[in-house]
Image (spheres, grey):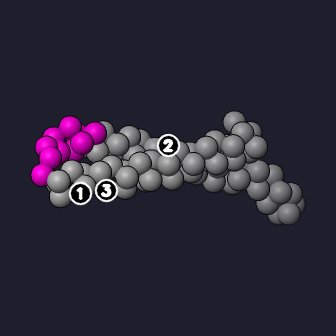
Amino acid sequence: MDRVLLLQHLAQARRRFADGERQVERQRQIILMLKRCGRDITDAQALLERFIEAQALYLQKLLGVRVALASRQREEKMPRMIQRLR
């Protein structure tokens, strides 16, 4: 995968992760509000758990793209390093 495409994937993964963080926090606030009102939080809690699971997947994707980008950058530097040794 070329560097430009990896950078695009990285930007998208960062956005998804940030969006997921906001979603998790919002769901936590909803649960607090429901608790204060004496409402049942079972469904809200289950949804929060799904959001947290999705967030773990987003983090895994983000880290994977970062590793791929770092690997690509090392590959790009290798020919230059070899030429300098000659």
Q: On the image, numbered disc 3 is attached to which residue?
A: 29
> Callout 1: few (<14), some (14-19), or many (20+) C-alpha neighbours within 10 Å?
some
Tell me: 19 left or right of 78: left
Of residue 8 and residue 65, the one placed in the foreground of this image is 8
Judged from the image, the secondary structure of the residue bearing numbered disc 2 is helix
State how far apart marks 2 and 3 are (Cα): 26 Å
Q: What's the residue at 85%, 63% (across, down)?
A: 84
Q: Quadrant of the N terminus?
A: top right
- Which of the numbered marks, if any, corresponds to residue 83? none
Asked whether residue 68 is in view, the answer is: no
State how far apart marks 3 and 1 are (Cα): 5 Å
Judged from the image, the secondary structure of the residue bearing numbered disc 3 is helix
Boundaries of the magenta span: 38-47
Judged from the image, the secondary structure of the residue bearing numbered disc 1 is helix
Q: On the image, numbered disc 2 is attached to which residue?
A: 61
Residue kind at label 2, given as amino acid type:
Lys
By secondary structure, the bulk of the magenta-drawn segment is best described as: helix
Residue kind at label 3, given as amino acid type:
Gln
> In the picture, residue 78 is in which quadrant?
bottom right
- Which of the numbered marks, if any, corresponds to residue 32? 1
- In the rendered image of this protein, does residue 83 appear above or below residue 72? below
Given this view, does label 1 or label 2 mark the residue nearer the observer?
Answer: 1
